[in-house]
Amino acid sequence: MTLTIATWNVNSIKARLANALDWLAEAKPDIVCLQEIKTVDEGFPREEIERLGYNIITHGQKSYNGVAILSKFPIEEALPGLPGDEEDEQARYLEAVISAPNGPIRVASIYLPNGNPAPGPKYDYKLAWMDRLARHAETLLKLEEPLVLAGDYNVIPRDSDCWDAEVWEMDALALPQSRAAFDRLKWLGLTEAFEQLDGRAHQYTFYDYQAGRWNKGQGIRIDHLLCSPQAADHLESIDIHKATRGEPKASDHIPIVGTFSL
DNA sequence: ATGGTCGAGATTCGA
């Protein structure tokens, strides 16, 4: 028995609906974490996706951000919002407990702040958000459950996760403080699925629309699955569904899928 | 080819 968990920044679920329906019907992932749905909850195209056999929870926002979780199995708990700042209005975090056939799995859909320009208030917000995420992850890890924190982390973990480290040197996605905050999540005991199972250089999950990056093969790897030991122990494979980026009306991000023997 | 990225939604901002 295997369970597949995917993450995909769709860059507007309404603009991407046809692409998303095609990919869901083809890849048939059990659980999907979506980011940048760019709509309020009422605007999410629920029925079209429900028809493919998914339960859906959303944490939406007008125009920007917004996250969702799709699941073939029942969703028992829906926990919108990252703890640690009551003032934070941005819809970037949605956690759920899913009743998978072989037991419950806790999943979160994460849209970590971009942080540019750095330095500045947006970068401060990114680092503060990452600190909140680490503190919350610490709490979740104490539960000793299968846990997957899946999303657009807006962090390039290594120089070899982009096509040209010099281009990204001063960017919020690659600055040492961003990488240190990402490393902190791993030191807490979370395993980054791609690094663990594959680790090859230059395997990208994002190609900017600008400057013909896709046609030039110039991407970055910023979408990640972070797994608790109880999930990482059952990790079997990780796949970057690169062909989606070449489709008409593609998102600038590529879906990645983890397969677990759970 | 006088352009050059896309999305939401308002005529600009965020990525």
Image (cartoon, coloured by chain):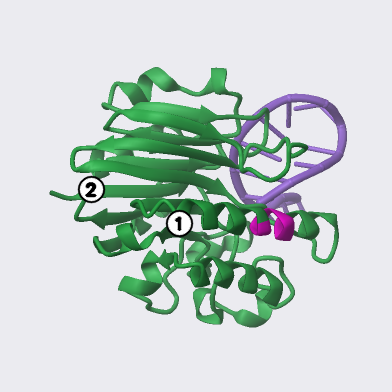
Chain colours: A green, B purple
Q: Which residue is mark 2?
A: A3
SS class, disc 2: strand
Q: Main secondary structure of the magenta part?
A: helix
Q: Quadrant of residue A62?
A: top right
Label 1 or label 2, whichever comes before in sequence order: 2
Q: Amino acid at mark 1?
A: Leu
| Above or below for A83 versus B15 | above
Same-chain status of marks 1 and 2 = yes
Q: Amino acid at mark 2?
A: Leu
Neighbor class of circle 1 (other Cα within 10 Å; few <14, some 14-19, many 20+) is some
Q: Position of residue A212 (x, y in %)?
A: 57, 62
The magenta stretch is A126-131
Q: Which residue is mark 1?
A: A141
Q: Nearer the viewer, mark 1 or mark 2?
A: 1
Q: Quadrant of residue A126?
A: bottom right
Q: Position of residue A142 (x, y in %)?
A: 45, 55
SS class, disc 1: helix
Is A236 on the left or on the right of A80, as rendered? Answer: left
**Measuring 48% from the left and 51% from the top, which residue is drawn there?**
A140
| Above or below for A26 versus A213 | above
In this orientation, which residue lies closer to the viewer: A247 or A132? Answer: A132
In this orientation, which residue lies closer to the viewer: A194 or A212? Answer: A194
- The CA distance from mark 1 to mark 2 is 20 Å
Neighbor class of circle 2 (other Cα within 10 Å; few <14, some 14-19, many 20+) is some
Q: Position of residue A112 (x, y in %)?
A: 61, 52
In this orientation, which residue lies closer to the viewer: A215 or A31? Answer: A31
Is A93 on the left or on the right of A232, as rendered? Answer: right
